[in-house]
Image: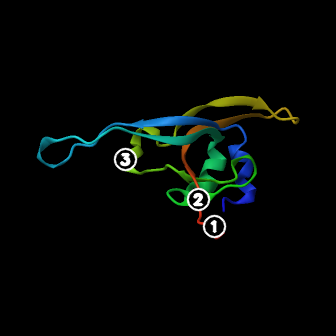
Amino acid sequence: MWPDEFAFLLDGSEEVDLHIPPVARDHGSTGKATTRKALRARISQENFEKIWSLAEARYRLDGKFTGKAITLIANNPHYKEWHPADGGAVEGVADSGHKYTTRYVIVHFLLDDVSEPVEA
């Protein structure tokens, strides 16, 4: 299960389709392009560093995504186009008057249906 403490990271995510180009096969032939469902999220660099260790593993979801599972794309060569990318920065001022910068990254999670056999 996806850890409850990180459930909020998926709140603003959007479902997208990843169009994966065909891979060259032996003897010059090419495979077929593949489309995969994914969630795209913009999260703070600080939160990304917290979930980095969860990358490349599959986690089931609860809530509005019940029946789905996600896999954080971090460094899989098949998905290099969707590796974490710069999501910009936001300047802010704390109540104390101190200026700060929050850096963001754009991350993609593969999104799969979870199906299990059910006995009648």
Tag shown at residue 118 = 1
Which residue is pictured at 58% across the width and 59% down the height?
Answer: 115
| Sequence order check, earlier mark of 3 and 1 | 3
Across and down, in percent, residue 95 comes to 88, 35
Q: Which residue is mark 2?
A: 115
Dot 2: element: loop
Confirm whether residue 107 shows in the render: no
Amino acid on which the number 2 mark rests in the picture: Ser
Dot 3: element: helix
Dot 1: element: loop
Q: Is residue 102 above or below residue 77?
A: above
Per the model, the C-alpha gap separating discs 2 and 1 is 9 Å
Q: Residues within 10 Å of mark 2 (few under 14, many from 20)?
A: few
Q: Which residue is mark 3?
A: 78
Q: Residues within 10 Å of mark 3 (few under 14, many from 20)?
A: few
| Nearer the observer, 39 or 115 | 115
| Occupied quadrant, residue 94 | top right
Q: Quadrant of the N terminus?
A: bottom right
